Amino acid sequence: MDFWQVIEARRSVRRFDTQRDVPPEMVERLLQAAIRAPSAGNRQPWHFVIVRRPEVKEELAAAAWGQHFVAQAPLVFVVCADPDRSASRYGRRGIELYCLQDTAAAIEHILLAATALGLGTCWVGAFDEGEAARALDLFDTLRPVALIPIGYPAREPGGRTSRRSLQDVVEYV
């Protein structure tokens, strides 16, 4: 798939083929894509936790207010921000904004790379950060930003949902 095909093909997937695992070499490729994301001042304030253990995936699904598909995926990437890495150069703005922008860029790289590899993903932002951090026994310095269940889709993803027109979202100055 070329870049534009990947952009068009990417969908949120919430049903996974539970009989197919994601091989370690694909996980490595996704991580390599993630760390190539842009980063303010090259601080790279991201940290990735790869979850395969069923009991931990269940805890993450509970932290995500019962979004059970999180636990049904073969693996879950938990993308965390390390605000202190950004703060060391940018102070408060690094904590409040740059570490989140940087991890969001890494998340999008993961989503697009997974699509290119034929995998399905869903960016889950609706979860209790404290519960997710406890489930993973994270250091206090790390903030979970997204849960990304990853696996082979159980079925072909549906059509694209409508998008606002360019006239509605663009202003030329």
Image (cartoon, helix red, strand yellow):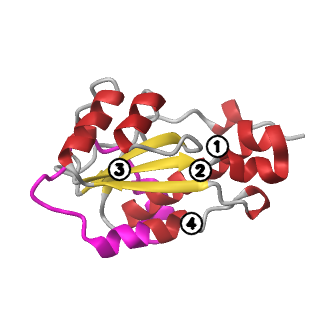
Give the labeled residue for mark 3. Answer: 121
Cβ atoms under marks 4 and 2 closer than 8 Å: no
Spatial distance from mark 1 to mark 4, Cα to Cα?
14 Å
Name the residue at the right extreme: 173
In front here: 63 or 35? 63
Q: Which residue is mark 2?
A: 103
Sequence-wise, the earlier of marks 3 and 4 is 4
Viewer-side label of 2, 3 = 2
> Quick one: label 1, few (<14), some, or many (20+) residues within 10 Å?
many
Task: Give the residue pinned by disc 1.
Answer: 100
- Element marked by disc 3: strand
Q: Amino acid at mark 1?
A: Leu
Picture coordinates of residue 152, whole percent (x, y): 23, 57
Mark sitting on residue 35: 4
Contact check, label 2 and label 3, Cβ < 8 Å: no
Q: Earlier in the sequence, mark 1 or mark 3?
A: 1
